Image: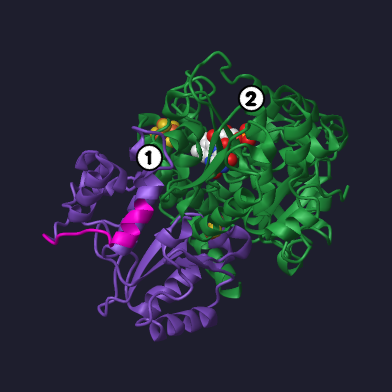
Chain colours: A purple, B green
């Protein structure tokens, strides 16, 4: 996917923190691992990384990846090579809200470029950057599978569709107002699995 | 032509809930199959139905199932491909959101037919909200005895699990998908061996699309032969088409295969024509990976026959004057759309999504994107157009997986059908840029 991560030999961030899931989350994670055949516990890597990213700081620091490796009894490198491949995993600190704007064909012809330009202007940042208050990260992503409702963006995987500038103003306003009350419209990965 | 099979009950309020779904005839195919048919009889109905894979390639589902290694002592797996990342395609999301039980029902009957006891639904991570919906449907099905041990009192056991991806188009390719479930990077495997022999965890595996598997319940209920009378020729049944682009009514439509393309684009109950009463310029009918066709060839084949929404009619003329039904991701372009810009955009997509294993794909997509970027931005050279076509030719057929072809075809077909537009960009860049700017401001 993002070859940059490989070619630039991007340094993984080591925070030095001791990281661990809460007992409740850990229990869910163990039950997720049990969904796969004996000896194939590595299969739980993607779902567990989603949970880890969300529960343990919003991105995958080296400490978090090493912790996940330990949980799944695999080597850290097996986690790193997966974390660098998939675009939903972040290797650097992100804002509280990660805004991902679709810039692929169908969205692009329906105003996706204007949406992106408007967000850059309003937030005062370029794609790939985070606002100084740590609230918003702006990313450009490929087709989100919602092209009939273009232009489309996701905020922490929640869909916002048929975007207009007015609608974006409204969304940003609500997100800011709710910034201290957890994530609106966005329940946690760990709650998604029964 | 308006026959609905998958979406027949879509308008029933709360149809996503178990009780409503069940009261409307839901899960009857599970009862019919498990209590009254052998697994071979169920597969037989699917074969007779002529159902073809709805994920893109259109491979006959019954035939694919028949390849499953019957001699192996290992467990077998069914994997439902819900990765849906092909630009222009958003039908599976719609189906899973509104009719999650239709999918679960199809999975149960399919697993029974295939002798499978563990099934994974691989869903793209961006569809996180659907994970909860599917898990809930699975829980409901289990609590009503349709999943788990001894289903309906028979010896048949089945578990279904949802497995999320994490943002990688390539994981829709079936072997990359299997790697991804195994907790690895989504690098496609070299075939053979095919998944039917060595799939998930090296075991016999069938991978099918969401829509394909959701069709199995209705097929068992109506019988394969009846299903085969719907549609046209070898394109049996109905197909979900996700329509987007410069049309008045974007959305997901269930069409009976055989509908004329013109009726689909201009019919009031479907796309309802081009936005702003503009004229139709071009269509990519099967997701971004299939060749683009100009309006004339989209409505009529090179021989002047009415172009129909079928696998055969859309590919009539092969890649010279035809295209493919693909995933049913129908992207419509009005007269103002810039084909060069669009081709650049889609090539950027493939460059980004190439897993990087094969040099023709990794390097070729990067070069094509670079060249298309400079043509679109008024810095192209006349020789660039042939260079692009040549790179596309060198990728095609020379890679491990079909993503290479998928990246090459849009470029090759755009140049074939819209060469003047590329030449215009190269020869009169200032005029083209000015025109694009004014279209943008108006639009
Ligand atoms: C790059 C690439 C991406 C694909 N993405 C998808 C996808 O998102 N969903 C899908 O069902 N099939 C996708 N396919 C096709 C699958 O490999 C496979 O053929 C399909 O899931 C088989 O199901 P079917 O026979 O029911 O169509 C993709 C293929 C390629 C080469
Ligand atoms: S064709 Fe492209 S995506 Fe497919 S295996 Fe080769 S490099 Fe990867
Ligand atoms: S192109 Fe934006 S959601 Fe598909």
**Residue B55 placement, left or right of B425:** right
Q: Looking at this view, is B96 or B265 the one in front?
A: B96
User: What residue do we see at 73% from left, 69% from top?
Assistant: B276
Magenta stretch: residue A25 in it? yes
Quadrant where the C terminus of chain B lies?
A: bottom right
Discs 2/1, front: 1
- What is the spatial separation of the Cα atoms under label 2 and label 1, in whole angstroms? 25 Å
Vertical arrangement, residue A90 with respect to residue B76, above or below: below
Q: Are marks 2 and 1 on the same chain?
A: no
Vertical arrangement, residue B440 with respect to residue A9, above or below: below
Q: Looking at this view, is B43 or B359 the one in front?
A: B43
Residues rendered magenta in the picture: A16-29
Residue carrying label 1: A43
Which chain letter matches label 1? A
Is ligand 1 closer than 8 angstroms to the Cβ of mark 1?
no
Is ligand 1 closer than 8 angstroms to the Cβ of mark 2?
yes
Which chain letter matches label 2? B
Ligand 2 resides in the quarter of the picture at top left
Where residue B374 sits: x, y (%)? Answer: 41, 51
Assign a secondary structure to mark 1.
helix
Residue carrying label 2: B64
Q: Does residue B389 appear in the picture of this structure?
A: no
User: What residue do we see at 25% from left, 78% from top?
Assistant: A132
**Residue B395 placement, left or right of B104:** left
Vertical arrangement, residue B276 with respect to residue B412, above or below: below
């Amino acid at each position: 996917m993002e070859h940059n991560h490989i070619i630039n030999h991007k340094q993984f961030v080591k925070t030095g923190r001791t990281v661990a899931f809460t007992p409740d989350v850990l229990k869910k994670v163990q039950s997720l691992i049990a969904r796969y055949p004996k000896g194939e516990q590595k299969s739980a890597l993607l779902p567990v990384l989603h949970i880890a990213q969300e529960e343990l700081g919003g991105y995958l620091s080296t400490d978090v990846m090493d912790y996940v490796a330990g949980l799944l009894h695999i080597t850290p490198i097996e986690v790193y090579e997966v974390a660098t491949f998939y675009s939903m995993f972040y290797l650097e600190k992100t804002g509280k809200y990660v805004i991902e704007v679709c810039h692929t064909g169908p969205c692009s012809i329906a105003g996706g470029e204007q949406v992106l330009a408007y967000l850059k202007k309003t937030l005062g940042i370029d794609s790939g950057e985070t606002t100084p208050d740590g609230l918003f990260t702006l990313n450009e992503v490929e087709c989100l599978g919602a092209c009939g409702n273009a232009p489309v963006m996701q905020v922490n995987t929640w869909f916002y569709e048929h975007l207009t500038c007015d609608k974006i103003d409204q969304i940003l306003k609500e997100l800011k107002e709710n910034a201290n009350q957890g994530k609106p419209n966005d329940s946690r990965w760990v709650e998604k699995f029964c | 032509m308006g026959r609905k099979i998958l979406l027949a009950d879509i308008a029933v309020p709360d149809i996503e809930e178990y009780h409503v779904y069940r009261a409307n005839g839901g899960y009857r195919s599970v009862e019919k199959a498990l209590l009254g048919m052998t697994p071979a009889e169920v597969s037989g109905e699917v074969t007779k139905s002529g159902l073809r894979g709805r994920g893109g390639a259109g491979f006959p589902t019954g035939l694919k199932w028949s390849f499953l290694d019957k001699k192996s002592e290992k467990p077998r797996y069914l994997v439902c491909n819900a990765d849906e990342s092909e630009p222009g395609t958003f039908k599976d999301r719609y189906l899973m959101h509104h009719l999650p039980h239709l999918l679960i029902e199809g999975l149960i009957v399919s697993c029974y037919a295939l002798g499978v006891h563990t099934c994974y639904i691989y869903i793209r991570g961006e569809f996180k909200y659907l994970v909860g919906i599917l898990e809930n449907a699975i829980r409901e099905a289990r609590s009503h005895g349709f999943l788990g041990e001894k289903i309906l009192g028979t010896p048949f056991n089945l578990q279904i699990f949802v497995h999320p991806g994490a943002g990688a188009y390539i994981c829709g390719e079936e072997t990359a998908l299997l790697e991804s479930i195994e907790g690895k990077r989504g690098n496609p495997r070299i075939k053979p061996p095919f998944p039917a022999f060595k799939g998930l965890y090296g075991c016999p595996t069938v991978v099918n699309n969401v829509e394909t598997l959701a069709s199995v319940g209705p097929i068992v209920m109506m019988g394969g032969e009846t299903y085969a009378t719907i549609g046209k020729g070898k394109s049996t049944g109905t197909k979900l088409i996700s329509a987007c682009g410069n049309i008045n009514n974007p959305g997901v439509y269930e069409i009976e295969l055989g509908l004329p393309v013109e009726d689909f684009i201009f019919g009031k109950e479907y796309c309802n024509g081009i936005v702003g009463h503009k004229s139709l310029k071009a269509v990519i009918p099967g997701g971004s990976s299939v060749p683009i066709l100009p309006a004339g060839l989209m409505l009529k084949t090179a021989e002047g026959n009415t172009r129909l929404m079928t696998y055969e009619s859309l590919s009539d003329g092969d890649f010279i004057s035809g295209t493919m039904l693909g995933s049913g991701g129908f992207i419509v372009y009005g007269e103002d759309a810039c084909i060069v810009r669009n081709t650049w955009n889609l090539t950027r997509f493939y460059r980004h999504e190439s897993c990087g294993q094969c040099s023709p794909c990794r390097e070729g997509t990067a070069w094509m994107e670079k060249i298309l970027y400079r043509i679109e931005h008024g810095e192209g050279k006349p020789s660039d157009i042939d260079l692009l076509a040549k790179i596309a030719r060198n990728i095609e057929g020379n890679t491990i997986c079909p993503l290479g072809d998928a990246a090459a075809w849009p470029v090759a077909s755009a140049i074939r059908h819209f060469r003047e537009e590329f030449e215009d960009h190269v020869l009169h860049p200032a005029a083209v840029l000015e025109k694009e700017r004014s279209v943008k401001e108006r639009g």
